[in-house]
Image (cartoon, rainbow, N blue to C red):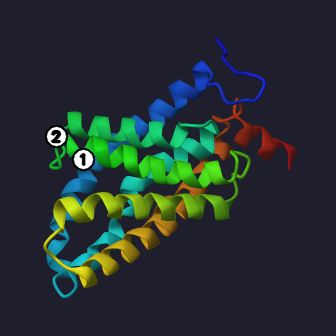
Amino acid sequence: MTTIGRDGSNWRTVDIVVGAVVAVAFGAVFLAWNAFYIATEPVFVFLPPAQAILYGVWLLPGVLVALIVRRPGAAVFGGLVAAAVSVLLGSPYGADALISGALQGAGAELAFAVGLYRRWTLPWAVLAGMLAGLFAAAHDIPIYFRETGLDFWAVFTAATMLSGALIAGVGAWLLLRALIGTGVLRDFAAGREQREI
């Protein structure tokens, strides 16, 4: 079944299924990453906001699903589905993870929207990761770090954006290349482009 319109903005069934599978897999990864992130707090005791350098793993599904599906809303879909699975598996952040996941996806979505959903290169993936990090910081600071002050906020935001650029942006790009190499994305534009090279 296909629902593609002339502008290519509508989703196909395969887009929904593959996007959901990728996001669900990351939702399960989040179970371990949540525990790891909490366990690393003592490592960053000298500069607590620098711990956000590890944040990018939570930003990955939005960027990766968008790079695969290449449809408006894919980044939000990826972030939200991954967060929903995380909540169902017992996220220590509770239902707030849903809001966070949607906002992280929205940050990545903004980058691809600025590129008019035609730019799927590494620099655009990095920008998507950075904006996902910015949106994540904008969500987390008033909820979890309201009492800490401007210095903390600045370091936390910079670390989250850097992590988004490297882990979510470059990381999603590398994961996309690996998936293309397996042939599982042959029904997607990313897979077809690789075959044409």
| Residue type at tag 1 | Leu
Q: Residues within 10 Å of mark 1 (few under 14, many from 20)?
A: some
User: In terms of depth relative to the viewer, which is nearer, 8 or 39?
Assistant: 8
Residue 137 found in image quarter: bottom left
Point out residue 18 in the picture as x, y percentages from the top left corner.
Answer: 53, 30
Residue pictured at 26% horizontal, 45% vertical? 97
The residue wearing badge 2 is: 90
Label 1: state its secondary structure: helix
Q: Cα distance, mark 1 to mark 2?
A: 8 Å
Q: Residue furthest top?
A: 1
Is disc 1 in contact with disc 2, using a CB cutoff of under 8 Å? yes
Q: Residues within 10 Å of mark 2 (few under 14, many from 20)?
A: some
Please give left or right for residue 56 compared with residue 32 in the image: right
Point out residue 96 in the picture as x, y percentages from the top left corner.
Answer: 22, 45
Give the quadrant of the N terminus: top right
| Residue type at tag 2 | Gly
In this figure, what is the number of numbered marks? 2
The residue wearing badge 1 is: 31
User: In terms of depth relative to the viewer, which is nearer, 32 or 64?
Assistant: 64
Q: Is residue 120 above or below residue 23?
A: below
Point out residue 49 in the picture as x, y percentages from the top left corner.
Answer: 25, 77
Residue 193 found in image quarter: top right
Label 2: state its secondary structure: loop
